[in-house]
Image (tube, grey):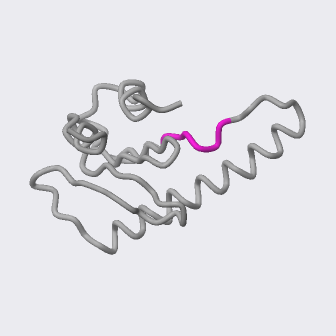
Amino acid sequence: MSEIDELVASPGVLMAGRFGPDGRVAEHKTAGLYVENPALTGIAQWFCAAVTTMFGSMAYAVDTLNQSGFNQTSWTYSGGDYVIAVHGDRFVIAERAKLGSLDELNQLLRAGQP
């Protein structure tokens, strides 16, 4: 079973995947019964890219001030009924009510990653 298969098999996960070097979704899988909408997949891709870019800018500013090593490639957004989590080049989109906790989701997403 691949990393992406393991992620999408987790409770509440609707989609899991990996971004390519150009920031586009290079690989993804969806949970059964979830009907993929290409327009929404594109919106999720650009949302993740925009937030990662924003955190990159913030990381540069913070590191300039205190060299703290702020990690702009790992973040979680929870709003309304859904959660989007990104770690490095991997992402998960899930239903908030069906997740055990955001910490569990982040640990799963980081498994095997630096």
Of residues 113 and 76, which is closer to you in this image? 113
Q: Does the magenta segment cover residue 64?
A: no
Tell me if 33 is positioned left or right of 105 in this view: left
* Residue at (41% x, 26% y) in the render: 107
Does residue 96 sit above or below 21 in this rendering?
above
Q: Residue furthest front?
A: 1
- Give percent across and percent down for residue 17: 35, 52
Task: Please tell me in which quadrant of the rendered image residue 5 appears.
Answer: top left
The location of residue 83, given as percent across then percent down, is: 38, 44
Residue at 36% x, 46% y is 92
Quadrant of the image occupied by residue 78: top left
The part of the chain drawn in magenta is: 71-76
Q: Residue at x 40, y 70 (%)?
A: 42
Residue at the limit of the structure toward the left, as seen here: 33
Q: Nearer the viewer, residue 35 or 25?
A: 25
* Number of numbered tags placed on the structure image: 0
Q: Position of residue 3 (x, y in %)?
A: 30, 39
For residue 21, side relative to residue 107 (left or right): right
Pinpoint residue 65: horizontal percent, then vertical percent. 90, 36
Front residue (pair 22, 35) = 22
Q: Specify the farthest residue to the right.
A: 65
Residue ID at (34%, 66%): 41
Q: Is residue 73 magenta?
A: yes
* Quadrant in which the C terminus is drawn: top right
* Quadrant containing the N terminus in the rendered view: top left
